[in-house]
Image: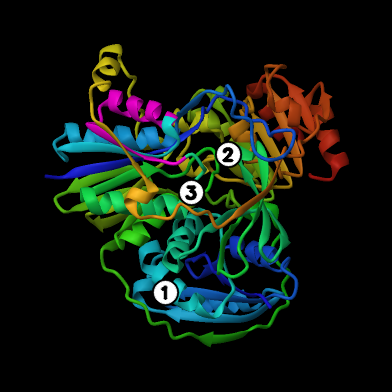
Amino acid sequence: MSKILVCLKRVIDYNVRVRVKPDNTGVITDGVKMSINPFDEIALEEALRIKEKGGATEVVVVSIGPADTQQQLRTGLAMGADRAILVQSDAPVEPLAAARAFLKLIEKESPSIVLMGKQGIDDDNAQTGQMVAALWNRPQATFASKIELDGGKAKVTREVDAGLETIEVDLPAVFTSDLRLNEPRYVKLPEIMKAKKKPLDTVSFGDLGVAPANAFKNVKFEAPTGRTKGIMVKDVAELVTALKQKGVL
Amino acid sequence: MSKILIVAEHAGGKLNPATSKSVSCAAQISGGEIHIAVFAADAGAVATQAAALAGVAKVLKVENAANAEPLAAVLAPQVAALAANYTHVFGPSTTFGKDLMPRVAALLGVGQVSDVMAVESAYKFRRPIYAGNAILTVEAPADQKLVATVRVASYQPAAAGGSAAIEAANVTAEIPSHTRFVSRSAATSGRPDLQSATRVVSGGRALANSDNFKILYNLADKIGAAVGASRAAVDAGYVPSDLQVGQTGKIIAPELYIACGISGAIQHLTGIKDARTIVAINKDPEAPIFEVADIGLVGDLFQVVPELEKQLG
């Protein structure tokens, strides 16, 4: 029966103000709250809704990261996923290596749909879904704001710069979620307890036969040069004068 | 020597300015030769516009009925095939390029540098991460093809006056039929395009409903501006999603940005940090938008905006 694979990434929580380390080797993560990437949470919610409407029989959450990533997978299980797989890696993994690992899991699980967020809010790369679709040689529907399943096909509305675009794809396919696909549910305490008993498997890159080697070198992390506060005006007349002085009107 | 292929973004026979800005980025790679590929059913008009961009050596037309709509799954194998003769493949970091380029990179078996904001060398770039809270300098291996998307807000359009040769390219690639275009609903406001507008009037949650956005439309029309919005205003349904400015919406760099009733969440500020002049109108004097605004006015936007429109008359 049909299965949905949802890829979750462990990231610094959306509400944390991210700071660069003083030695420019990364950003500060010690003692910082970690969460499921918000876009991936939306992807999981969509998978659960599809299953609840009878469009799938199983939702499997998968992630790549250090052992602590089990926390985010447990949250995913508490939301309603049936089981979880962690590809454990202590070092950061680039999107292409992540896509290669996900492909191995896809080949093993044979899902009809792979869902994940359109981008991670940490690296802002927005690559992994498209790369999985390419390696899998299957359709992709990125930035999805509406997914309608129809047998072996899906109609997906995508948020593009010009407005909304609708495409039709044959399943299996990869979908990446945009913000307005849905609003994820809140996890209730009994579900958290239940999630502790759901299966969570851990595998390594070695088990999958994928090299986790990163091609890119992160040379330096820097804080952005911020804008400085300008002037305050007290009324519209002063505003118009200031705009004219700046030559922007 | 670097040979750089730029994938053109276009619609309705018009080259998107994002392509021209991608040329400006590619031109930062010293000694590079820049070619533009136009994938279309009929690439003629777009190729002519691309050939007129200064710094472009050649324009390649890849014409095929399947290329009538910009579907990543259809275009990616063709771009990957064409990439054989190049060291670099660039696309704009618009929804078009973000959709397409990672698929191209994976087909080529290489990673991608997303959102290039500065070129340090042919294989070393600067890019924003964490919603612009950090800038990463990243170095890619020089013995691999370099695939990148260009953060268009960081670049000016290339100058006119080029006269590149236009050639039809033969591309052998298997084009899938598993992905089909259905429809596109484009907003037809008659106003400038938000991504490339020189002036933008933007509204937030304080507008309270979609009717109230009319006062922003009136001001925008008076000064020839595009209209944008914060995520809060889009989520509340006041305006369509293509007006969203910010980390997950559009990243823009207008000459003038007038933020009305926008508090200034970091995710929103990410989308406007390259604006030349930011004006903030907000009744909350503590709103974070004032920390980045060049000109701030504490006041009720429902009085200030119509008054501003009147005084500009």
Tell me where residue A26 sits by quadrant: top right
Among all residues in the image, which is located at the extreme right?
A: A245
Q: Which residue is mark 3?
A: A126
Among all residues in the image, which is located at the extreme left?
A: A1
- Tell me if residue A12 comes above or below residue A146 in the rendering: above
Q: Disc 2 vs disc 1: which is toward the camera? A: 1
- Spot occupied by residue A24 in the image (x, y as percentages of width and height): 72, 39
- Tell me if residue B199 comes above or below residue B124 in the rendering: above
Q: Same subunit under labels 3 and 1?
A: no
Q: For this rendering, which residue is in front, A178 or B256?
A: A178
Q: For this rendering, which residue is in front, A123 or A70?
A: A70
- Spot occupied by residue B138 in the image (x, y as percentages of width and height): 65, 53
Is residue A84 magenta-colored? yes
Q: Which residue is mark 2?
A: B246
Q: Which residues are magenta?
A: A68-89
- Spot occupied by residue A242 in the image (x, y as percentages of width and height): 85, 34
Q: Quadrant of the C terminus of chain B?
A: top right
Q: Quadrant of the N terminus of chain B?
A: bottom right
In what element is the residue under mark 3?
loop
The reply to whether the C-beta atoms of the residues labelled 2 and 1 are less than 8 Å apart is no
